[in-house]
Image (tube, coloured by chain):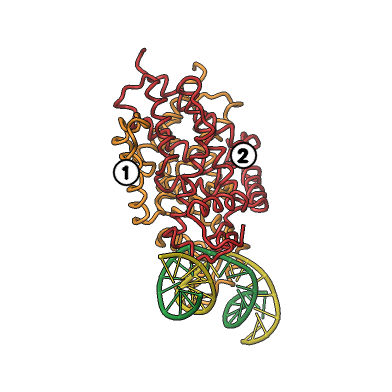
Chain colours: A red, B orange, C green, D yellow
Amino acid sequence: MAGRRRWSTEEILDAAAELLRTSDADSFSVRKLAAVLGTDSSSLYRHFRSKTELLRAVADRILLEAMDGYRPEGDWKQRITALALNLREAFGRHPQLAATWGRYASSGTGSRLLMEEVLQALRSSGLPDDEIPTRYHRIAVLIAALIASEAGISTVTPEEYEQGMELFRVAVLGADPDRFPALARFGRDIHPLGADRPAAFEELLAAHLDRIEAALPPA
Amino acid sequence: MAGRRRWSTEEILDAAAELLRTSDADSFSVRKLAAVLGTDSSSLYRHFRSKTELLRAVADRILLEAMDGYRPEGDWKQRITALALNLREAFGRHPQLAATWGRYASSGTGSRLLMEEVLQALRSSGLPDDEIPTRYHRIAVLIAALIASEAGISTVTPEEYEQGMELFRVAVLGADPDRFPALARFGRDIHPLGADRPAAFEELLAAHLDRIEAALPPA
DNA sequence: ACCTGAACACCGTTCAAGT
DNA sequence: ACCTGAACACCGTTCAAGT
């Protein structure tokens, strides 16, 4: 990678995406990116005003990547679910970008493609036009929140995760049965927040879409 | 605050909670906390193995604070909703801790109280015992994801937020109507992810709880 | 026994000086 | 016109040396 002198904005974004994919936890930095490119971090500031702007640009690219493998199939619920799973997978490979996506309103072509597909799916559902913007927003909030939350968990180091699990076990199993009767009864079977995420994602989304469907006006 | 020589773990947690409340964005640091206490950052490492452990302990305290103002009232859905809104408010005052809460399985008394109340509410709903752990988990994932996501947005600086809004506007209004017909049709009425959050939170939660209720076995 | 200071290995960002 | 190097103002964490 090193040895060249000049890098285009596109090449920088490529390298950043690659570094974000391979670097674990929160270890991505402007300086490391510059090192990979064989240049000084200060030269990247000609292409981006800040690290945030750089991350936002890479997040757009991930969105595009997620949309790339998408072909509309099935009914509106299946289409939205497929989109959501594509996003989950793409941001699963770039956990640090999921937070960026959720934090900053996205833009760019990937974002447009995504919005278009979800809106078309909703339109084909039979939902009245005036309800579409709000329904769209709620679906977007749900998906972004779940993806960002899952990605956040995946940036926890194994040691920290195990430490947290141990604390959870103590909290649940060590609870006084007189003060916490329900916890004593059910605690053993409860997953901590970080566990069972894929199933929770699919169920929460499916439940929400089913509920929209149930409230549709008769065809 | 300064001038004293020795600080108990509890006093450190108090000061940390206060600093997290007043410091904006991601500006909390171990060094700043030490400065507030008039001591050196290294001395805090006798009380906590890492910054993460410190944040986790403060998050537990926030949970306790949220549970403090809670009195069970109404049916099971109202009780869970009241708990969720309490949490949302408490972490709204400490946005940086919402991420910690969502990332690490929580423990401590606050966490136990919260779990107990949600479990009791679910039990009183008429849900079969063997479904309670999974229902509990999905509700917890949903609430934690929404709160962390909302808190993440609130750590964006006003300039960055405005920048993001502008990009969103361009993405939506500048879309080619031939390639993005649905976007051209509905874009004007769509809120960006960061907007309309309180309503989205309440609706998504209410929708999920309604759906659990609809699937309850007949009384 | 406890705390302090200094140090290590990092950050994001700016800007004068070089080519 | 573009890049580099050095600098600024920070980080989390460790550990020998002090009291």
Residue B93 spot, x, y in % from top left: 40, 53
Q: Chain of mark 1?
A: B
| Three-letter code, disc 1 | Arg
* Residue displayed at 49% across by 25% down: A72
* Residue displayed at 61% across by 51% down: A156
Q: Is residue B107 visible?
A: no
Residue B108 spot, x, y in % from top left: 57, 50
* Residue displayed at 29% across by 36% down: B188
Toward the viewer: C1 or A90?
A: A90
Tally of numbered discs: 2
In the picture of the structure, the residue carrying the numbered disc 2 is: A195
Q: Chain of mark 2?
A: A
Helix, strand or loop at label 1? It is: helix
Residue A176 falls left or right of residue A66: right
* Residue displayed at 33% across by 36% down: B190
Dot 2, crowdedness within 10 Å: few (<14), some or many (≥20)?
some
Q: From what the image shows, is residue B135 above or below residue B46?
A: above
Residue A202 falls left or right of residue B176: right
CA–CA distance between discs 1 and 2? Answer: 37 Å
Helix, strand or loop at label 2? It is: loop
Q: Are both tags, 1 and 2, on one chain?
A: no
In the image, farthest residue toward the top: A219
Where residue B169 is drawn, which disc sits there? 1
Toward the viewer: B133 or B147?
A: B147
Toward the viewer: A190 or B101?
A: B101
